[in-house]
Amino acid sequence: MQFFAGTEISPSLPAATASGNNGHMMYVFNRDGICLLDREWNRPLHTLNAQQDHKLMSGLLFSLKSLTAKMDPTSVEKGNLGVPQLPGQGCSFHSFRTNTYKLSFMESPSGIKLILITHPRTGDLRESLKYIYNLYVEYVVKNPLYTPGTPIRCELFNIALDQYVRSIS
């Protein structure tokens, strides 16, 4: 099944953006900002506990979404900073890069937010995030044992995600 145009679960994967395993971390948040998944592959320094990390990431996304909506040069009506917008509404961001990492972001129409943190030289990951979202739908949403809004504990999803993230980077 396909949820984003041009993105198939099988048989073809989006093209790899670079060589090597450069995926550091992945987060999945629901529309309420609750972290459903927190995966780490290559994170040498742990400075926060998991709950603080989730709050910081959720706040960063909320702030960046508000800022991009406020700075949108095509919209006459700007609204107030901090006012939540519906997914796909207004201007949005896809990624930002620092000297030590790149954060790539995608929000689904249902409000699921995917965040993938990789090496700073990693290319555009929008198609990869769509593919990961389709993995989420196939292995988590369609799982009759999964209760929406609870942490994701699906071994098949974790295996598919690990395998795919190791192939990207």
Image: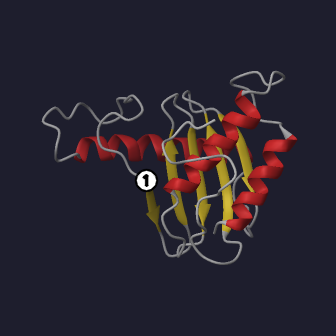
Residue 37 x/y as whole percent: 72, 42
The quarter of the picture where the N terminus appears is top right
The relative height of residue 167 versus residue 127 in the rendered view (above or below) is below
Residue 109 x/y as whole percent: 48, 31
In screen coordinates, is 106 left or right of 45?
Answer: left
From the viewer's side, name the closer residue of 40 and 44.
40
What secondary structure is found at the residue carrying circle 1? Answer: loop
Question: Which color scheme does this rendered protein use?
Answer: secondary structure
Question: Which corner quadrant of the image does residue 52 belong to?
Answer: top right
Q: Residue at x 23, y 47 (%)?
A: 71
Q: How many marks?
A: 1
The relative height of residue 146 versus residue 163 in the rendered view (above or below) is above
In screen coordinates, is 23 left or right of 82?
Answer: right
The quarter of the picture where the C terminus appears is bottom right
The residue under label 1 is which amino acid type?
His
Question: Seen from this angle, which residue lies furthest front?
Answer: 11
Q: For label 1, count other residues whose C-alpha is less than 10 Å away and answer few (under 14), some (14-19) or many (20+).
A: few
Residue 128 x/y as whole percent: 58, 55
Q: Residue at x 50, y 46 (%)?
A: 106
Q: Which residue is mark 1?
A: 94
Q: Residue at x 79, y 43 (%)?
A: 157
Question: Seen from this angle, which residue lies furthest left?
Answer: 76
From the viewer's side, name the closer residue of 161 and 38.
161
Q: Residue at x 51, y 40 (%)?
A: 4
From the viewer's side, name the closer residue of 47 and 44.
44
From the viewer's side, name the closer residue of 136 and 105.
136
In screen coordinates, is 108 left or right of 150?
Answer: left
